[in-house]
Amino acid sequence: MRGQKWYDGPIEMNLEIYAPKLEEKKGLDDYIGGVMDTLDGSHGQYFTYLPVVYQDDCQVALGSHRFIESSEIYYILEIVFHEYERITKTSFTYHGPISR
């Protein structure tokens, strides 16, 4: 996150997965759910522990995800930080390999 604090406002999350195929019995919702769980914080009764991008999955207000059949295996994740009062947005995109 380039040294920034996690975000408290609405988030848009767009994920593209490139691979020959998805794992059996796994849909795109399983992948996006895993990404969302990785980027938010763990919650205790009175605190949020180590959020990476945002505090809670419920902040993801918009998004898309799709699978593209490809001989190469990688993904593109775009996070868009929407502001409450304005329609402007700031985004962060990661394009990286999928580790096995």
Image (cartoon, grey):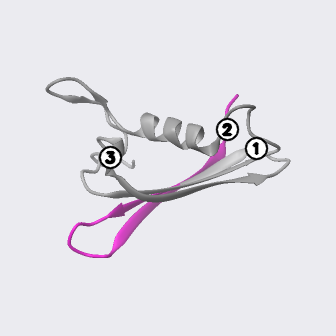
* Label 2 to label 3: alpha-carbon separation: 25 Å
Check disc 3: other Cα within 10 Å, few if <14, some if 14-19, many if 20+. Answer: few
User: From the image, which quarter does the C terminus lie in?
Assistant: top right
Under tag 1, what secondary structure?
loop
Residue at screen point 83% across, 44% down: 20
Q: Earlier in the sequence, mark 2 or mark 1?
A: 1
User: Front-most of 14 and 52?
Assistant: 14
Q: Amino acid at mark 2?
A: Ile
Furthest-left residue in this view = 46
Mark 1 Cα-neighbour bin, 10 Å: few <14, some 14–19, many ≥20 = some
In the image, is 13 to the left or to the right of 96? Answer: left
Look at the image and give the residue range highlighted in magenta.
78-100
| Residue at image location 26% in from the left, 56% down from the top | 9
Mark 2 touches mark 1? (CB < 8 Å):
yes
Which numbered disc, 3 or 1, marks the residue that appears first in the sequence? 3
Residue 88 located left or right of residue 77: left
Residue 86, image x, y percentages: 25, 75
Q: Is residue 83 magenta?
A: yes
Label located before the other in sequence (2 or 3): 3
**Looking at the image, which residue is at 45% across and 41% down?**
36
Find the residue positioned furthest to the top: 44
Q: Which residue is mark 1?
A: 73
- Residue 95 lies, with reference to residue 23, above or below; the image says below
Q: Which residue is mark 2?
A: 98
Percent position (x, y) of residue 5? 27, 46
Mark 2–mark 1 distance (CA, rounded to whole Å)? 6 Å
Looking at the rendered structure, which numbered label has been put on residue 58? Answer: 3
Q: Main secondary structure of the magenta part?
A: strand
Residue at 22% x, 67% y: name it.
Answer: 84
Residue 11's x, y, as percent? 36, 56
The amino acid type of the residue labelled 3 equals Cys
Horizontal and vertical percent position of residue 85: 20, 72
